[in-house]
Protein backbone atom coordinates (compact mmCIF):
# COMPACT_ATOMS: atom_id res chain seq x y z
CA UNK A 1 0.00 0.00 0.00
CA UNK A 2 2.83 2.39 0.85
CA UNK A 3 4.60 1.61 -2.40
CA UNK A 4 1.38 2.24 -4.32
CA UNK A 5 0.70 5.58 -2.57
CA UNK A 6 4.27 6.72 -3.19
CA UNK A 7 4.07 5.67 -6.85
CA UNK A 8 0.74 7.44 -7.41
CA UNK A 9 2.08 10.61 -5.80
CA UNK A 10 5.35 10.50 -7.75
CA UNK A 11 6.18 7.72 -10.25
CA UNK A 12 9.89 8.43 -9.68
CA UNK A 13 9.64 8.31 -5.86
CA UNK A 14 12.79 7.82 -3.82
CA UNK A 15 13.56 6.16 -0.51
CA UNK A 16 12.94 9.33 1.51
CA UNK A 17 9.45 9.78 0.07
CA UNK A 18 8.69 6.09 0.61
CA UNK A 19 9.73 6.40 4.26
CA UNK A 20 7.51 9.48 4.69
CA UNK A 21 4.52 7.63 3.26
CA UNK A 22 5.30 4.65 5.49
CA UNK A 23 5.35 6.85 8.57
CA UNK A 24 2.00 8.41 7.68
CA UNK A 25 0.38 5.08 6.80
CA UNK A 26 1.46 3.57 10.12
CA UNK A 27 -0.50 6.34 11.84
CA UNK A 28 -3.75 5.17 10.22
CA UNK A 29 -3.17 1.42 9.77
CA UNK A 30 -2.11 -1.09 12.38
CA UNK A 31 0.41 -3.42 10.74
CA UNK A 32 2.73 -5.89 12.47
CA UNK A 33 6.11 -5.46 10.78
CA UNK A 34 7.93 -8.13 12.80
CA UNK A 35 10.70 -9.13 12.65
CA UNK A 36 11.45 -5.53 11.60
CA UNK A 37 11.51 -2.76 14.20
CA UNK A 38 9.79 -0.16 12.05
CA UNK A 39 9.02 0.73 8.45
CA UNK A 40 12.52 2.09 7.78
CA UNK A 41 14.04 -1.19 8.98
CA UNK A 42 11.65 -3.09 6.71
CA UNK A 43 12.63 -0.96 3.69
CA UNK A 44 16.34 -1.33 4.42
CA UNK A 45 16.39 -5.05 5.22
CA UNK A 46 13.26 -6.51 3.64
CA UNK A 47 12.79 -7.75 0.11
CA UNK A 48 10.37 -5.62 -1.90
CA UNK A 49 7.62 -7.40 -3.82
CA UNK A 50 6.24 -5.02 -6.43
CA UNK A 51 3.74 -7.53 -7.84
CA UNK A 52 0.92 -6.28 -5.60
CA UNK A 53 1.65 -2.66 -6.56
CA UNK A 54 1.39 -3.65 -10.22
CA UNK A 55 -1.89 -5.53 -9.63
CA UNK A 56 -3.45 -2.62 -7.73
CA UNK A 57 -2.29 -0.16 -10.38
CA UNK A 58 -3.76 -2.34 -13.12
CA UNK A 59 -7.10 -2.59 -11.32
CA UNK A 60 -7.24 1.18 -10.73
CA UNK A 61 -6.49 1.84 -14.41
CA UNK A 62 -9.22 -0.62 -15.42
CA UNK A 63 -11.74 1.16 -13.17
CA UNK A 64 -10.69 4.56 -14.56
CA UNK A 65 -11.19 3.26 -18.12
CA UNK A 66 -14.70 2.02 -17.25
CA UNK A 67 -15.57 5.42 -15.77
CA UNK A 68 -14.09 7.26 -18.77
CA UNK A 69 -15.98 5.01 -21.20
CA UNK A 70 -19.32 5.65 -19.45
CA UNK A 71 -18.69 9.39 -19.55
CA UNK A 72 -17.73 9.21 -23.23
CA UNK A 73 -20.93 7.31 -24.05
CA UNK A 74 -23.40 9.09 -21.76
CA UNK A 75 -21.76 12.50 -21.38
CA UNK A 76 -19.84 14.24 -18.58
CA UNK A 77 -22.87 14.29 -16.27
CA UNK A 78 -23.47 10.53 -16.49
CA UNK A 79 -24.51 8.70 -13.31
CA UNK A 80 -21.41 6.59 -12.64
CA UNK A 81 -23.02 4.63 -9.78
CA UNK A 82 -20.43 2.31 -8.22
CA UNK A 83 -17.68 3.65 -10.49
CA UNK A 84 -17.83 6.96 -8.55
CA UNK A 85 -15.73 6.34 -5.44
CA UNK A 86 -17.03 9.56 -3.86
CA UNK A 87 -20.68 8.45 -4.02
CA UNK A 88 -20.59 4.66 -4.07
CA UNK A 89 -21.68 2.54 -1.10
CA UNK A 90 -19.46 -0.29 -2.31
CA UNK A 91 -17.30 -1.48 0.62
CA UNK A 92 -14.11 -0.70 -1.31
CA UNK A 93 -15.25 2.87 -1.99
CA UNK A 94 -16.28 3.37 1.64
CA UNK A 95 -12.86 2.06 2.76
CA UNK A 96 -11.06 4.35 0.29
CA UNK A 97 -12.94 7.41 1.56
CA UNK A 98 -12.13 6.48 5.17
CA UNK A 99 -8.41 6.03 4.41
CA UNK A 100 -8.26 9.39 2.64
CA UNK A 101 -10.04 11.05 5.57
CA UNK A 102 -7.67 9.42 8.08
CA UNK A 103 -4.60 10.29 6.01
CA UNK A 104 -5.74 13.89 5.62
CA UNK A 105 -5.17 14.37 9.36
CA UNK A 106 -1.47 13.62 8.86
CA UNK A 107 -0.76 14.91 5.34
CA UNK A 108 -0.95 18.49 4.16
CA UNK A 109 -2.85 18.48 0.86
CA UNK A 110 -2.83 21.46 -1.50
CA UNK A 111 -6.04 23.51 -1.77
CA UNK A 112 -6.70 21.99 -5.18
CA UNK A 113 -6.46 18.43 -3.79
CA UNK A 114 -8.74 19.21 -0.83
Image: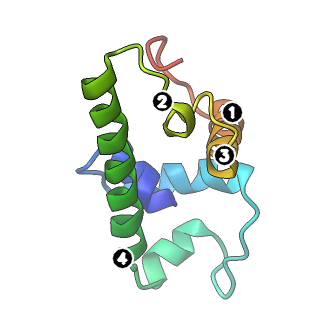
Give the residue at mark 2: 80
Residue 72, placed above or below residue 31: above
Q: Are marks 3 and 2 in contact (CB under 8 Å)?
A: no
Q: Is 74 on the left or on the right of 32, as rendered? A: left
Residue at far right of view: 30
Mark-to-mark CA distance, 4 and 3: 25 Å
Q: Of the residues under marks 4 and 1, which one precedes in the sequence?
A: 4
Q: Residues within 10 Å of mark 2 (few under 14, many from 20)?
A: some
Give the residue at mark 3: 90
Q: Residues within 10 Å of mark 3 (few under 14, many from 20)?
A: some
Give the residue at mark 4: 51
Q: Residues within 10 Å of mark 1 (few under 14, many from 20)?
A: few
Mark-to-mark CA distance, 3 and 1: 17 Å
Q: Of the residues under marks 3 and 2, which one precedes in the sequence?
A: 2
Mark-to-mark CA distance, 4 and 2: 29 Å
Give the residue at mark 1: 101
Q: Of the residues under marks 3 and 1, which one precedes in the sequence?
A: 3
Q: Quadrant of residue 67?
A: top left
Give the residue drawn at x 63%, y 51%. 92
Q: Quadrant of residue 73?
A: top left
SS assignment at label 2: loop
SS assignment at label 1: helix
SS assignment at label 4: helix
Mark-to-mark CA distance, 3 and 2: 13 Å
Q: Of the residues under marks 4 and 3, which one precedes in the sequence?
A: 4
Q: Which residue is nearer to you in this view: 39 or 79?
A: 79
Viewer-nearest of discs 3 and 1: 3
Any part of residue 17 in sight: no
Residue 94, placed above or below residue 87: below
Q: Which residue is nearer to you in this view: 109 or 15?
A: 109
Residue at far front of view: 74
Viewer-nearest of discs 4 and 3: 3
Amino acid sequence: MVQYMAKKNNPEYGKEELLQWGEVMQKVMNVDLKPHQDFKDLVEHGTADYSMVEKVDGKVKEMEQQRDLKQAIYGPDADLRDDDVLKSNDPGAVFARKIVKDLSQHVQFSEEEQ
